[in-house]
Amino acid sequence: MSKKQKLELTWIGKENRPRLEPRILLEDPARSYHAKRRLTSADFFDNRLIFGDNLLALKALEAEFAGKVKCIYIDPPFNTGQAFEHYDDGLEHSLWLSLMRDRLVILHRLLSDDGLFWIQLDDNEVHYCKVILDEIFGRQNFISHITYERSGAAGLGLGGFVVSTGESILLYKKNQLPLRRVLSHQLLDGKTMKRYNKALVDLGERTLVREFESKSNGELVQVYKHTGFSIKTISLAKFEERENEIRAEFADKFEYLFRTNQIQKENQFQRDLVSMMDKSHLYTVDYTPSRGKHEGKLTTLYYHNAELFAWLKDTSELSDGQITKSSSITNVWTHTEIPKADIANEGGVDFPRSKKPEQLLRRIIDMSTERGDWVLDSFAGSGTTGAVAHKMGRRWIMVELGDHCLTHIAPRMRNVIDGMDPRGITSASGWAGGGGFRYYRLAPSLLEKDKWGNWVINHDYNAAMLAEALCKLEGFSYAPSDAVYWQHGHSTERDFVYVTTASLTHEQLQQLSDEVGSDRSLLVLCTAFRAKADAYPNLTVKKIPKQVLSRCEWGHDDYSLQVENLPTMEKADPPKPGQQSLFDGEA
């Protein structure tokens, strides 16, 4: 019997995985930002904007945030255009898949058990990516393949057999779904507006014309006739030209908009009521239903032309000056659900072709999280994810390597914090400002080569940075004690780590051992020591950098997914046995 096999996607270089260095993050206080005062008790100031390679940044976050992020949304480069024109056939897709796989593995670790993962792609790589996600998340955790209507056919030209107007969003859960039900809110469509284009603007005077007891429950039924009433019809002529004007009038008269329905033949109670009415008048009937959702409650029905009123407000809602209808969310997200007419102005930043509408992220975050939950976007782009999360009262982490981290994202978030961003979901979410964020950059590699080619501790590292970096490498939480000099971090309540660039003597190690005591243990990382490493039962003594030399790929700063920026490759013969291939040792 052959080795057990499984269904999987294979590609050149799949087995080559980078040995990532878990870098530390260095805050830049001059670029961090917060509101001048706390506006509410729910303001969050621990949000993170990280400048640097996103694969290294994800690795840097892993120790602190594994299993804590409720919503991850990424919009990676799609592998489109002429990015690979210099590569041999097929290799570009292998490279893209390797680069994506390495990120997806860490993102899966960061996601909480009830977290949701969203990835937006076009049709170039979405199907390959789906198979990788099935491997990482488990096929049983796939939820949906959503089609997002990015644009209409107009303006895209007529090229191509089928014009592409949509993108794909793949949705996965970590283990369990969050206990949330979110509805879709779509702008009132023209067909519905034609049906509900009458408004009862004035009830006039009403006079009791009939009174009797209900046969079903004995409650009093009162029939009133109205005089001097006013019904206005809203014109929908030239709708495309006047749409904003018409919608504004609908919103202004929302409480009074109605249509009428003929009475069903089988409803004898309604037929009896209508038989008492003149068709040209308005009538109201006060009664107490004996069943249904209004059972036992005094209710008023409205009639005109002997037909029963149906109110628009009973099936729609008015929010932020717009009338919308609610329904269950499907796997097709259209323009009417997620309008993007003002997307160019959202956030006050220019980001051609790549900016996502705030309403899209609002839906994603709303479906995934509660207030205070963590939201992560490791391809931050123009910063839409963080802006929306901030306005919705969520904590956020964004990672971006491009210059727009400073030119677009940071200014956008400062405007959000200062309450100076009036667009997007600001009004709908009731956002008025507050909170803040910390700006981080990746520390340089812990080790660098000296002029003789030997790996040494990076000269940019001070004592605190060295201690924090080695804590992260060894799996300790960095928590330096003010009272105990040798406690730089801990893994449990009784296991500690001490980092020093000193050369320790036998006497110094013995003193450390005595202070640690028999009920605790200490990992000592030092540049040199003059004693037997196993002479102290409660100490583990190791040299640096020797202790960590084989752990990682040192000095590797760029795992960029922007594959068009990689050096070009000449077409070559297949490697002979024993030769190193293009992807050996690379991801």
Image (tube, grey):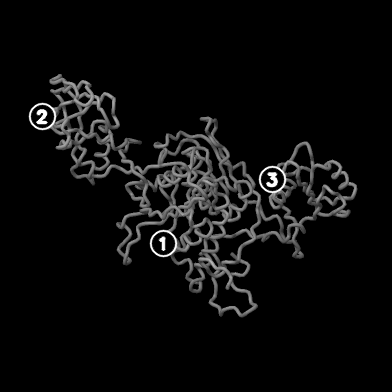
Q: Residue at x 51, y 34 (%)?
A: 434
Q: For the C terminus, which image quadrant?
A: bottom right
Q: Residue at x 33, y 62 (%)?
A: 163
In the foreground, 373 or 322: 373
Identify residue for label 3.
477
Label 3–label 2 contact, CB within 8 A: no
First of labels 1, 2 by sequence position: 1
Task: Give the amino acid type for the residue marked by disc 1 in the picture.
Answer: Asp
Q: Position of residue 492 (x, y in %)?
A: 72, 43
Return the residue found at the far right: 507
Single out the mark in the foreground, 3 or 2.
Answer: 2
Identify residue for label 1.
123
Q: Quadrant of residue 547?
A: bottom right
Task: Give the amino acid type for the residue marked by disc 3 in the picture.
Answer: Ser
Task: Give the amino acid type for the residue marked by disc 2 in the picture.
Answer: Ser
Secondary structure state at the residue bearing disc 2 = loop
Label 3–label 1 contact, CB within 8 A: no
Q: Around disc 2, counting alpha carbons within 10 Å, would you say few (fewer than 14), some (14 to 19), or many (20 or more)?
A: few
Question: What is the tally of numbered marks visible in this picture?
Answer: 3
- Answer left or right for 466 relative to 129: right
Secondary structure state at the residue bearing disc 1 = loop
In the foreground, 227 or 178: 178
Single out the mark in the foreground, 1 or 2.
Answer: 2
Q: Position of residue 349 (x, y in %)?
A: 45, 47
Secondary structure state at the residue bearing disc 3 = strand
Q: For the N terminus, which image quadrant?
A: bottom right
Q: Position of residue 97 (x, y in %)?
A: 52, 64
- Answer left or right for 98 relative to 331: right
Identify residue for label 2.
275
340 vs 217: above or below:
below
Q: Is residue 88 among the parts visible in the rendering? A: yes
